[in-house]
Image (spheres, rainbow, N blue to C red):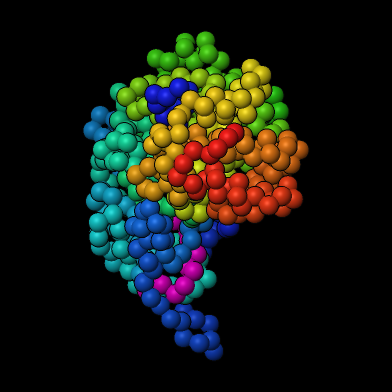
Amino acid sequence: MRRSVSRSVSIIGTLVAATTLSSLAAAPVFAARGAAPARFSAGAQGVGDPYFPQEGNGGYDVAHYDLKLAYDPATHHLGGSNTLIAVAKKGLSRFDLDLSGYRVSSVTVNGTAAAFRRDGQELVITPAQGIPRGTTFRTVVSYAGTPKTIKGSPVVFGAPYGWIYTKDGAFVGCEPNAARTWYPSNDHPSDKATFRFTVSVPKSRKVVANGDYVGHHVNGDTDTFVWNQPKPMATYLATLGIGRWTFHRTTTARGIPSFTAVDPSLEAQARDQHTVALSGRVTDYWQKRFGRFPFTSTGAIVDNVPSIGFSLETQNRPIYGFVPDPGTVSHELAHEWFGDSVSVRDWRHIWLNEGFATFGSWLWSEHTDGDSTLSQAREVFRGIRAGDPFWDLSIADPKRNTMFSQSVYLRGAMTLAALRHRIGDQDFFTLLRTWVRDHEYGNVTTRQFRTLAERVSGEQLDGFFETWLWKHRKPGRL
């Protein structure tokens, strides 16, 4: 995610193929003959994230989401179903999904009606029979209602996020916890899954989402668009863009498919700023610097929503509420490696997303303008006085309401610039490439990064990371 701020600088597993859902027969819910009786208990209401204790749910891992939705921009009505394929991590007597709002009309588990009730943001589901540990099970939730935009949250400094209404449809940016505002899910980055989106809209509109464009078909006054995300994705990175889009389908110079949707009102500006080509160039350069592009396509979703003030690294194609500049594009596309493929284990480690992406924007500037990441870091460092509250934050544990503060972005990027200067380019870029290769589609912590940095460089770096990530004061030098 990138925001506009006023400073001396400007910053703006189990894989399930979506096409084989019908072949995923749920395993029997009885123990095998001669086996010990299965034991069942309720899954936890949250995964234990210290910042968002109610987000996510315990007892199972989702492998795939199959969303079949219809949206009417005139009435703001969203309805349909979500089919979840999951694996029980324990014997489950009941389990929760995260869902805020909506009327849930039915829930089935393995094809049989299940009891359900609402408890705040929790949809509590009790299947007709307990689900043994290790069992793959299929849950279908049918629901309908009006998506509610999250407003006034101190987490994102009062900016609206989640499902955001536009003149011609919707702009959906869910970091950190707004996936529950439009589909039932295990809403935490520690549980990634593949996705399929089948979305019907009036035929005057188009739909763009994550992954690969499968196609569309018109039925009367309705047009249905299908998108398939074959790589694991955190729930907050799922998006829908609904509007009167102009679609651009191209390929980067290195052969990566690229799909960009542009609001027609911004088409001329996007053309002038070479947005489509820029996304391709940045993706190709990051592949050279960070390693293999981890997804099947790249691109962008460029909407005209100036009031939101942010862009977001939605997987495959970041969303922008404006025509982005190179710094913003390079920031969000760096997230495809740092944040999307390699994701945080819990939200305390958010600097591993935002500090890396901000460093990425500096690295792109170095590549195009020649100004080194170290000199850019020093400019920021020198521009913020020692007594500024900016420094009074441990970015390795920035706390819930300051997890998207400037310190996380800029001090995180300064940490990486300082680390590059200390261990040298060869070890530093080996470190980054090893990090994304070893943790592709996984979840990570700050301690893991420090350990790898020491292994790659052969240096003892406890003091370095303590100074840059944990201390509540400005480091002595950069």
As drawn, 100 above or below 297: below
Q: Is residue 76 magenta?
A: no
Question: What residue span does the magenta drawing correspond to?
Answer: 83-93
Residue 213 lies, in percent from the top left, at 53, 34
**Residue at horizontal 47%, vertical 72%?**
90
Q: Residue at x 54, y 58 (%)?
A: 23
- The answer to which image quadrant residue 54 occupies is bottom left
Looking at the image, which is closer to me, 298 or 461? 461
Q: Quadrant of the C terminus?
A: top right
Question: Where does residue 473 sit, x and y in percent of width and height?
Answer: 46, 41
The answer to which image quadrant residue 312 occupies is top left
Foreground residue among 48 and 148: 48
Q: Position of residue 462 (x, y in %)?
A: 61, 52
Above or below residue 327? Residue 172 is below
Q: Nearer the viewer, residue 50 or 287?
A: 50
Q: Majority secondary structure of the magenta segment?
A: strand
Q: How many marks?
A: 0
Q: Answer with left or right where residue 272 lies relative to residue 457.
A: left
Can residue 169 be seen in the rendering of this structure? no
